[in-house]
Image: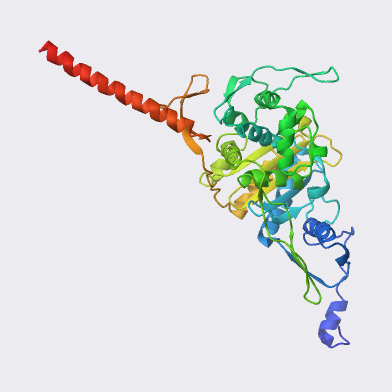
């Protein structure tokens, strides 16, 4: 620098007296390593032979620097705090995607966001626990003749004999049984036994089909009843894809970080046009999201509602056996955010979805400021009236004071209540006429 006159003699003399400032322990550092790991993967898939490392390519990505920066800051802040409960060597991963287009806005592959090592966001296959449950309830809500949000599900001790002769007896996390619970409450509170009862009524094949529609490869789905409680291993990337489709009224947009690739001569080698295709009925997806908003209102993620009561956030916690994996998927009007926490050696982290992943999401969304989640209501949805029984179950009642959305494809609900209203009016008219003549004859 001195030879090229970039430093004066005085600056040179001052500089050479300074220590070299060598790190005591060497460390690789790179900006957004997990995100650009995904970019490289997409380059190889979508550009193929035209992609050569070192070749002059211009890449246009869907990275949102604000989401990435705030996610990194939240990880650096929250991991040490959560480790006070879980112990050291806790790992995490985050995937943040646009709710409607599927464009990946940010990605973190480990508890040190700047270390370009193992990318847990796309490579770590971990048990997902209760994160699977919305797919079970969505499978039911696809059949409006059989199931509504208010359908009662049994919550009683349950034992299932497996093909190998073993007996599986799932229990609720709190070890309590409630007799019967409405479907939307079972999802919001993440009750295990009602979920398994519902899954058994639907069948493993039905739920598996729903999962494949939501973007999960069939070979990754175990064909056993424990599937209903998430005995399957997925990456945070795959979980994000599943929830993107649910959160977008049943329209799946393939997750992508690469928007366009242009070579050094200006030739466009690849360009992505965000597109979404309908994979499950919009009505069923909308009703599932309604219940996931209840998860935040009064369910397992209710702590969020205290912070953002007017944002109508949706989400789902997930916990696996012995607290090995902690999950949270949060949805606002802008993004789908998947957070995983756990250990690389798969030993217990002593965490639930609420005590681990949800805490990280909460810190992130507090700084990102959520966009209110306004769901576009599909056609054929009506407001059903109910009377709430003493045991908490819902009874259809056209004169009830509690309303719940319902998929009414044939208009039967509206027609039945109209008929009941006409009959009620006729009874009231009849009473008035009879009353008039009673008074007349008394006179």
Nearest to the observer: residue 199 or residue 340: 199
Residue at 76% across, 48% down: 237
Residue 172's image quarter? top right
Residue 189 position within the rendered picture, expressed as x and y whole percent measured from the top left: 61, 31
Residue 211 position within the rendered picture, expressed as x and y whole percent measured from the top left: 72, 38
Q: Quadrant of the C terminus?
A: top left
Q: Looking at this view, name the residue that lies furthest to the left.
A: 443
> What is the image's colouring?
rainbow
Q: Is residue 400 left or right of residue 112?
A: left
Nearest to the observer: residue 132 or residue 337: 132
Residue at 77% across, 57% down: 35
Residue at 63% across, 41% down: 315
Nearest to the observer: residue 194 or residue 312: 194
Above or below 14: residue 251: above
Q: Is residue 274 visible?
A: yes
Residue 191's image quarter? top right
Residue at 86% across, 60% down: 28
Nearest to the observer: residue 441 or residue 223: 441
Residue 336 position within the rendered picture, expressed as x and y whole percent measured from the top left: 66, 49
Q: Is residue 440 left or right of residue 220?
A: left
Residue 438 position within the rendered picture, expressed as x and y whole percent measured from the top left: 17, 13
Q: Is residue 352 visible?
A: no
Above or below 400: residue 127: below
Q: Quadrant of the N terminus?
A: bottom right
Above or below 58: residue 396: above
């Amino acid at each position: 620098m001195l030879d090229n006159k970039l430093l004066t003699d005085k600056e040179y003399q001052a500089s050479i007296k300074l220590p070299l400032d060598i790190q005591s322990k060497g460390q690789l550092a790179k900006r957004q390593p997990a995100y650009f790991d995904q970019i490289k993967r997409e380059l190889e898939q979508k550009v193929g032979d035209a992609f050569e490392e070192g070749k002059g390519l211009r890449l246009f990505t869907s990275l949102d620097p604000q989401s990435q920066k705030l996610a990194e800051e939240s990880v650096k802040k929250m991991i040490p705090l959560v480790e006070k409960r879980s112990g050291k060597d806790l790992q995490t991963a985050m995937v943040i995607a646009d709710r409607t287009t599927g464009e990946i806005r940010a990605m973190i592959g480990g508890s040190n966001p700047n270390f370009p090592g193992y990318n847990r966001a796309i490579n770590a296959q971990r048990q997902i626990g209760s994160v699977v449950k919305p797919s079970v309830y969505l499978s039911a809500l696809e059949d409006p003749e059989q199931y509504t949000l208010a359908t009662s599900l049994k919550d009683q001790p349950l034992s299932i004999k497996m093909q190998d002769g073993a007996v599986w007896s799932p229990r609720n996390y709190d070890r309590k049984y409630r007799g019967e619970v409405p479907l939307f409450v079972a999802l919001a509170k993440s009750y295990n036994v009602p979920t398994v009862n519902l899954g058994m009524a639907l069948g493993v094949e039905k739920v598996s089909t729903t999962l494949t529609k939501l973007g999960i490869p069939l070979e990754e789905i175990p064909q056993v009843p424990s599937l209903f409680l998430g005995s399957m291993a997925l990456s945070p990337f795959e979980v994000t894809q599943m929830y993107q489709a649910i959160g977008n009224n049943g329209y799946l947009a393939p997750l992508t970080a690469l928007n366009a690739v242009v070579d050094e001569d200006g030739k466009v080698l690849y360009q992505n046009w965000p597109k979404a295709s309908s994979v499950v009925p919009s009505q069923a997806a909308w009703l599932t999201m309604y219940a996931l908003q209840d998860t935040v209102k009064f369910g397992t993620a209710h702590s969020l509602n205290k912070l953002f009561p007017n944002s109508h956030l949706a989400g789902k916690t997930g916990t696996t056996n012995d607290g090995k994996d902690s999950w949270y998927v949060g949805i606002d009007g802008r993004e789908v955010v998947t957070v995983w926490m756990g250990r690389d050696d798969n030993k217990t982290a002593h965490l639930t979805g609420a005590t681990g992943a949800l805490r990280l999401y909460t810190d992130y969304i507090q700084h990102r400021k959520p966009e209110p989640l306004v769901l576009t209501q599909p056609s054929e949805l009506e407001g059903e009236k109910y009377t709430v029984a003493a045991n908490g179950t819902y009874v259809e009642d056209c004169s009830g004071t509690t309303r719940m959305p319902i998929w009414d494809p044939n208009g039967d609900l509206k027609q039945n209540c109209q008929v009941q209203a006409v009959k009620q009016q006729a009874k009231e008219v009849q009473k008035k006429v009879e009353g008039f003549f009673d008074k007349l004859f008394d006179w």
